[in-house]
Image (cartoon, grey):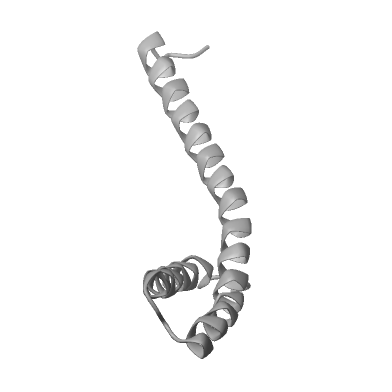
């Protein structure tokens, strides 16, 4: 026979539920993170090729904004894709 009180078993089952939910969230985060890292890595590789036409044609007017935006996107892609295949 068990000497544990009902409140102890409720606390234990509550703790088990918390652990299972936490592990599920971690697993879900890993499933989402891998494709994001993949896309970030390859975006960081490909985006510099878009600089070439802008730089060769000269930056005029709104092209300066587009170039800055491409630089910012490339920096973001580098950060996101940094852990790909590690």
Q: Identify which residue, 23 or 73, lies in the foreground.
A: 73
Measured along the vertical axis of the image, is residue 39 above or below residue 46?
above
Left or right: where 14 falls relative to 24? left
In the rendering, at what x and y percent does residue 78 appear? 48, 73
Task: Specify the farthest residue to the front.
Answer: 61
In the rendering, at what x and y percent does residue 31 appear? 62, 49
Q: Identify which residue, 21 or 13, lies in the foreground.
A: 21
Q: Identify which residue, 14 or 6, lies in the foreground.
A: 14
Measured along the vertical axis of the image, is residue 69 above or below residue 60?
above
Q: Quadrant of residue 45?
A: bottom right
Which quadrant does the C terminus fall into? Answer: bottom right
User: Total label count?
Assistant: 0
In the rendering, at what x and y percent does residue 73 appear? 45, 67
Measured along the vertical axis of the image, is residue 55 above or below residue 25?
below
User: Residue at left 55%, top 66%?
Assistant: 40
Q: Quadrant of residue 48?
A: bottom right
User: Residue at left 47%, top 21%?
Assistant: 13
User: Residue at left 51%, top 40%?
Assistant: 25
Q: Is residue 84 visible?
A: no
Q: Is residue 14 visible?
A: yes
Left or right: where 31 falls relative to 73? right
User: Residue at left 47%, top 38%?
Assistant: 22
Q: Identify which residue, 71 or 1, lies in the foreground.
A: 71
């Amino acid at each position: 026979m068990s000497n544990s009180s009902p409140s102890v078993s409720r606390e234990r089952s509550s703790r088990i539920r918390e652990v299972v939910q936490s592990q599920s969230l971690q697993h879900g985060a890993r499933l989402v993170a891998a494709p994001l890292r993949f896309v970030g890595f390859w975006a960081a590789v490909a985006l510099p090729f878009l600089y070439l036409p802008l730089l060769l044609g000269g930056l005029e007017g709104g092209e300066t904004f587009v170039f800055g935006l491409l630089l910012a996107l490339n920096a973001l892609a580098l950060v996101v894709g940094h852990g790909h295949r590690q």
